[in-house]
């Protein structure tokens, strides 16, 4: 039995029926990481000892039937922007090279309580700034489907790890497509939940008003199960929503017949790769075959989504990254420094990569006296219009469908020279974050051998509908069952 | 040189730490002054560890509302937090969470004595907003040390319009704000601990002009004395600059207490650009009108109202009434004693503003913690009122009460201090005194009436001052009258 | 060199770099200047949208009055905290000289 090609659901069944122990499962994952990850480089840090210790504890719990949760004994990895107590957390930045948090993020705490087993931390674009995972200050992650290609970003390591069987699920984080775009590039399922659905406490913030922690795994069932475990209000995150968390995994399997699926016409314009477009159209036909009503809708402010997204990102990120000043943790360049201002200047020069530098400088610029109204405030106003677009669309349909990216995974180095071109690869995924709505990425085919992803967008706090539609699709397709040709 | 007369223009910002158990945005203890060591009241939030998030302290909001109402402000039903961005080692996040365009309270006022000396003038309070305090920095040799125990302690910043036309009225306002904050129990007012800090925005202009000239901002004034001296110095400095044909540069100044001068604090030529924007980690505070109104019931009688009532109810002199009303604990103490003594409110007032406060000051005590219970002072006043002891004895008993904490009756009994008013005892002594001093008696009866005082003194000496001198005097006069016949 | 209708010159780049305390060289400022002009130029696209009657959306989810009860909690470990600090002394975090005041 190849443990590395299991889905979370099948592993769950095997653990419960004692066909496999968590230690065996965890060891298989660690073995595979040590065997194939040198080529992919999805992991920044692997926590072998801790993982086996946790797996052992999970086995004890399973043996005694003590608090057997759906995730007990399930090995997973997490993007390196969530604080893990005692485990180095870098955000793939030099400025945090030796930072070891003394507390756990709420999501980590919840998963640990549920008995899930932490395998390690995933590589990412530095502080989540990037769409290819090439902006890691340490090394780029490669796409398990084609090692010359990027896995997408910024949760590139998380997507590659889940796709290549180096963990049964990944915890990613989506600020403007960072779960969905790499999920599409790597042929896995990933959720960007509603803003506020999952606590951000302990997540190293990129954009406080966009950041959404979400699971990535092979199937909708897997993603729904993990979402159930990590969602909910948290007294330490004032923006987390006090709305009950449904039993997502229990409501799968309901028919989608008669539900309405909207096609936002602004998303289907020139610029989309032919293979991507045909895969999406086939998926739409599939939904029609499942009894859904297909309807064209308009999101008239779509083309402003990207500037709105980036302007707000620059502003919030410039403040969120101010705490990396070489005083309390992380890199500190003090040699030859005249005073503390010098330390700031040198530390941040040495510790941040170019993309981070660009974005925080642009943030300072757009917030500056005299520019605030023209950029930051303007973006916040157009943000209202973006949200209204979605609200109006959801008066007509239950969900929207769109590609996760206009292309499939591109080659390493292909877009690094021009930051603006890299920004444009996020064109389909960025508008959801300013609007705060949930979006589920689901594999929907291949274009020239590379995976294509679609996303299903829904109303605030209506993840349930997205899971229902995505699950129905996966019952009649097998794209998500295709595994990358590695190892 | 021209002989233009200049007018002072001052606006005040007061930073008051709120008296909460925990910090503004985290659960760490806010009581940094009694922390045993540096960095022992800290958590991921107030040290700005990556990923930590703020949560608003309900008590700080309540206290801010109380202050806002006490200062006649509008409490804004929709108010929000903002990030004020700047780098400094005492600011761990690289931004301070403060309130900017939508503060919790705005447009209030407070009356202070008019500069003319007659009546009052109204100072307009522009706003009061919630924010967080910074860490403490200590300079040691070529480096600095940081203690985050104070980082994140709730602060209320109260800002006036530039309404003061004299340093005196600014001082009067500051004093009154301190009294009100203490009344509300939201700030203990201990200036030496730095829990109340002033910033003065100072400019001058020719008398008769209504322009606002360039102002300077004097930061971190930690006492009324520093506020007075720094503002006075700055007013005089600016006048001199204008008189010499110069211009005032808008800048931030510090106050050098030792040299008695203001000093420029701008180390880099870059002007501040705080890049305020709404704090995305905190939802807005939406306060319903009913919620805001519920705080009116919690507002205590404030110093001005209390002064008025003391005038009306007890017939005190205005300055006495104001003195007693300046501290809530003193006023409460006063009223408790008045209720428990048979003597008049004026007598109680005399005791409080005289002997009692003298003891409190001499012993360096706070009026919040007068060790003599009100019931004891009432008892003491009654002992004097009943002439069990005389006035001087009563004062020394009070000193003893401060020292031992014992009740006045106990002290009087234990030390045999009770006044001798027994006519029989005194009469015996008087008759003996007359019999023993025939020469002085003859001299008195011969017209040297001043000798009466000498006879009284002799009895006082014999009784160690416990004789009721009024009674002794009457007995002597009676006996002399008999001898005359 | 690409021409942009909008220019952010090297001096402006250096100014904003200083605002976020980022040491950069003159050459780097030149490079960023080009990129920034292109990016901001593209973002000026928002000027076509009429937002005169549109309120800004700071937050998308309408939570409000999320308050914490005023109860003091124990401190985290100072030793653990100082382990991450580049330098410390006597329980304090140590930094280089502080010149001037903010
Ligand atoms: Mg302030
Ligand atoms: Zn704290």
Image (cartoon, rainbow, N blue to C red):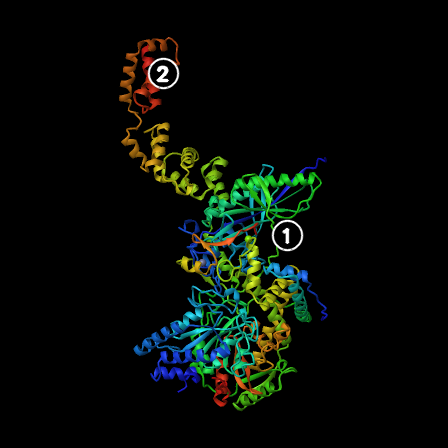
Callouts 1 and 2 in the same chain: yes
Image quarter of residue B342? top left
Does any portion of residue C71 appear in the rendered image?
no
Q: Residues within 10 Å of mark 2 (few under 14, many from 20)?
A: few
Disc 2: host chain? B
Q: Viewed as shown, does residue A50 lie left or right of A394?
A: left
Image quarter of residue B329? top left
Q: Quadrant of the C terminus of chain B?
A: top left
Q: Quadrant of the N terminus of chain B?
A: top right
Which residue was labeled with disc 2? Answer: B454
Q: Secondary structure at mark 1?
A: loop
| Relative image position of residue A26 (x, y in whole percent) | 39, 78
| Distance between the alpha carbons at the discs numbered 1 and 2 | 81 Å
Which residue shows up at 29% across the image and 15% down it? B433
Q: Judge by depth and name the residue closer to the eye, A232 or A476.
A: A476
Which disc number belongs to residue B269? 1
Q: Viewed as shown, does residue C90 lie left or right of A374?
A: left
| Relative image position of residue B87 (x, y in whole percent) | 56, 56
Disc 1: host chain? B
């Amino acid at each position: 039995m190849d443990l590395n090609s299991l889905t979370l659901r099948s592993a769950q069944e095997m653990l419960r029926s004692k066909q496999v122990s968590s230690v065996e499962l965890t060891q298989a994952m660690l073995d595979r990481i040590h065997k194939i990850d040198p080529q992919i480089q999805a992991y920044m840090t692997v926590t072998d000892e801790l993982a086996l210790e946790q797996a052992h504890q999970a086995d004890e719990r399973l043996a005694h039937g003590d608090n057997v949760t759906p995730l007990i004994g399930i090995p997973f990895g997490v993007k390196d922007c969530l604080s893990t107590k005692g485990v180095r957390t870098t955000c793939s930045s030099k400025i945090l090279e030796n930072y070891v948090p003394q507390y756990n993020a709420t999501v980590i705490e919840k998963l640990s309580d549920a008995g899930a087993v932490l395998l390690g931390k995933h590589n990412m674009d530095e502080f989540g700034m990037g769409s290819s995972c090439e902006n890691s200050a340490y090394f780029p992650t490669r796409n398990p489907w084609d090692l010359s290609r990027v896995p997408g970003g910024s949760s590139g390591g998380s997507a590659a790890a889940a796709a290549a069987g180096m963990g049964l699920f990944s915890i990613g984080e989506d600020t403007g497509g960072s779960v969905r775009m790499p999920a599409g590039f790597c042929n896995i399922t990933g959720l960007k939940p509603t803003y506020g659905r999952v606590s951000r406490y302990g997540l190293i913030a990129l954009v406080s008003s966009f950041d959404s922690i979400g699971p990535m795994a092979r199937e909708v069932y897997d993603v729904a199960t993990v979402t159930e475990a990590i969602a909910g209000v948290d007294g330490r995150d004032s923006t987390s929503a006090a709305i009950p968390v449904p039993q997502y995994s229990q409501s799968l399997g309901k028919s989608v017949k008669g539900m309405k699926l909207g096609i936002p016409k602004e998303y289907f314009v020139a610029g989309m790769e032919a293979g991507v477009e045909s895969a999406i159209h086939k998926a739409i036909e599939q939904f029609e075959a499942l009894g859904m009503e297909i309807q064209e809708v308009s999101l008239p402010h779509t083309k402003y989504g990207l500037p709105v997204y980036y302007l707000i990102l620059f502003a919030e990120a410039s403040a969120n990254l101010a705490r990396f000043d070489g005083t309390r943790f992380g890199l500190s360049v003090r040699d030859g420094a005249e005073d503390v201002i010098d330390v700031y200047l040198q530390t941040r020069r040495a510790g941040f990569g170019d993309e981070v530098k660009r974005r925080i400088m642009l943030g300072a610029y757009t917030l500056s006296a005299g520019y605030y109204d023209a950029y930051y405030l303007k973006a916040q106003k157009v943000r209202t219009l973006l949200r209204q677009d979605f609200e109006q669309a959801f008066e007509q349909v239950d969900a929207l469908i769109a590609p996760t990216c206009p292309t499939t995974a591109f080659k390493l180095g292909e877009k690094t020279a021009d930051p603006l071109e890299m920004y444009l690869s996020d064109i389909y995924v960025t508008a959801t974050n300013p609007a705060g709505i949930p979006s589920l990425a689901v594999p929907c085919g291949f274009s020239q051998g590379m995976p294509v992803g679609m996303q299903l967008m829904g109303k605030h706090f209506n993840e349930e509908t997205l899971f229902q539609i995505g699950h129905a699709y996966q019952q009649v397709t097998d794209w998500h069952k295709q595994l990358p040709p590695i190892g | 040189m021209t002989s233009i007369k200049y007018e002072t223009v001052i606006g005040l910002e007061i930073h008051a730490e709120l008296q909460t158990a925990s910090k503004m945005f985290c659960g760490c203890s806010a009581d940094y002054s009694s922390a045993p060591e540096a960095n022992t009241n800290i958590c991921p939030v107030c040290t700005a560890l990556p990923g930590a998030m703020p949560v608003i302290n309900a008590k700080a909001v309540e206290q801010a509302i109380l202050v806002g109402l006490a200062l006649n402000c509008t409490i804004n039903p929709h108010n929000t937090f903002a990030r004020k961005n700047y780098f400094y080692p005492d600011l761990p996040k690289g931004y301070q969470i403060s309130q900017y365009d939508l503060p919790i309270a705005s447009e209030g006022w407070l009356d202070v004595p008019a500069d003319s000396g007659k009546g009052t003038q109204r100072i307009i309070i522009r706003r009061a907003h919630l924010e967080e305090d910074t860490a403490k920095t200590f300079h040691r040799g070529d480096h600095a040390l940081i203690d985050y125990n104070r980082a994140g302690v709730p602060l209320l910043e109260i800002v006036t319009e530039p309404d003061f036309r004299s340093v005196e009225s600014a001082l009067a306002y500051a004093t009154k704000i301190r009294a009100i904050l203490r009344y509300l129990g939201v700030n203990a007012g201990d200036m030496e601990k730095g829990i109340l800090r002033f910033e003065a925005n100072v400019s001058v202009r020719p008398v008769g002009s209504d322009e606002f000239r360039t102002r300077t901002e004097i930061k971190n004034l930690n006492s009324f004395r520093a506020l007075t001296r720094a503002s006075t110095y700055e007013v005089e400095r600016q006048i001199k600059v204008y008189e010499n044909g110069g211009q005032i540069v808008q800048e931030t100044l510090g106050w050098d207490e030792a040299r008695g001068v203001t000093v420029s604090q701008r180390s880099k030529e870059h002007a501040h650009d705080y890049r305020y924007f709404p704090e995305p980690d905190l939802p807005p505070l939406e306060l319903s009108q009913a919620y805001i109104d519920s705080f009116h019931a919690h507002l205590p009688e404030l110093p001005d109202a209390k002064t008025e009532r003391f005038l009306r109810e007890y017939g005190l002199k205005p300055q006495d009434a104001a003195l007693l009303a300046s501290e809530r604990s003193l006023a409460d103490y006063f009223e408790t004693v008045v209720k428990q003594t048979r003597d008049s409110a004026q007598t109680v007032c005399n005791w409080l503003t005289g002997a009692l406060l003298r003891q409190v000051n001499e012993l360096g005590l706070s009026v919040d913690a007068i060790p003599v219970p009100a019931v004891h002072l009432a008892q003491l006043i009654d002992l004097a009122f009943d002439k069990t002891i005389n006035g001087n004895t009563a004062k020394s008993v009070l000193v003893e009460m401060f020292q031992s904490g014992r009740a006045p009756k106990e002290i009087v009994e234990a030390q045999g201090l009770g006044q001798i008013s027994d006519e029989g005892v005194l009469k015996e002594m008087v008759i003996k005194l007359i019999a023993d001093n025939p020469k002085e008696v003859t001299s008195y009866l011969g017209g040297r009436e001043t000798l009466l005082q000498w006879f009284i003194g002799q009895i006082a000496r014999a009784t160690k001052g416990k004789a009721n001198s009024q009674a002794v005097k009457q007995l002597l006069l009676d006996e002399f009258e008999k001898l005359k016949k | 060199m690409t021409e942009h209708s909008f220019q952010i010159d090297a001096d402006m780049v250096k100014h904003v770099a200083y605002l976020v305390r980022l040491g950069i060289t003159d050459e780097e400022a030149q490079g960023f200047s080009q990129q920034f002009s292109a990016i901001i130029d593209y973002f000026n696209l928002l000027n076509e949208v009429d937002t005169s009657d549109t309120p800004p959306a700071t937050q998308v989810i309408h939570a409000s009055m999320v308050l914490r009860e005023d109860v003091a909690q124990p401190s985290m470990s100072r030793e653990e905290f100082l382990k991450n600090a580049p330098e410390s002394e006597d329980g304090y975090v140590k930094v280089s000289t502080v010149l001037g005041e903010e």
